[in-house]
Image (cartoon, helix red, strand yellow):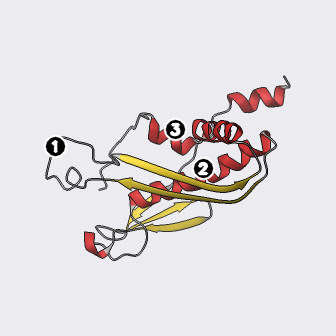
Amino acid sequence: MSTEKSQTRNQTLTFAVAAAAESPTETRVSVRDFEFVVDEPESLGGANAGPNPVEYVLGALAGCLNVTAHVVAREMDLDVRDLEIAIEGDLNPATFMGKREDGRAGYQEIRVAVTADVDADAETIDAWLAAVEARCPVSDNLRNATPLALSFDRRE
C-alpha cells in the first residue's frame, strides 16, 4: 500500500458551517463560498424563505447517496444512468413543540427509493445498493448515534 493511500485512509476531515438567526424561524448559513437559508413554512410560523431543517436533512441524504452511488458504481464498473432518489420521512412534531416528553423529536422512519438505468443483474444491484448505504456518510449519521457537543458562550 502506498503512503498516499495510507495517509488518505487515516485522514479525518473537518467540515464546518456558521449560522446566524435572521428571525425566530429563519437562519442564514454560510459554508465555504456559499450561503443558504433555513426557514419554516408559513404553516409552522415561518416566512417560507427556504427549506426547513428536517427537509435539509433529507436533501443532504439525497445528495450524499447520489455521490456515493456514483463512486461505488465506478469501482464496480457499473454504468449508472438517470439516477433518481425519492426520500420521505415521518416526523411527529409533538416532542419538538413541547407537547410530549416521550418519543423522538426527529424522524421516526426515512424511506429512500432509488430509480436508475443500470445494466446489471439483481444480485449486483443489491450489492451496489448495500455498499452505497454502508459508505454514505449522511446515511451513517442518520443510522448511528453521533456524539454531539453543545456549548454556550454568553454575548456581552
**148 or 132, which is in the foreground?**
132
Amino acid marked by disc 2: Leu
Quadrant hosting residue 50? bottom left
Of the residues tagged 2 and 1, which is closer to the observer?
A: 2
Left or right of 18, for residue 107: left
- Packing grade of label 3 (10 A; few <14, some 14-19, many >=20) is some
Q: Which residue is mark 3?
A: 140
**39 or 109, which is in the foreground?**
109
Left or right of 151, for residue 11: right
Residue 52 at x, y percent in the picture: 39, 64
In the image, residue 82 above or below residue 106: below
Q: Residue furthest right?
A: 2
Q: Secondary structure at mark 2?
A: helix
Residue 99 at x, y percent in the picture: 13, 52
Residues marked 3 and 2 touching at CB (< 8 Å):
no
Mark 3 and mark 2: span between their CA atoms? 11 Å
Task: Write the residue at 61% across / 56% down.
Answer: 115
Q: Secondary structure at mark 1?
A: loop
Amino acid marked by disc 3: Asp
Q: Which residue is mark 2?
A: 65
Amino acid marked by disc 1: Glu
Task: Write the residue at 48% across / 40% down.
Answer: 141
Task: Write the residue at 64% across / 36% down.
Answer: 131
Quadrant hosting residue 32? bottom right
Residue 156 at x, y percent in the picture: 29, 56
Q: Residue furthest top?
A: 1
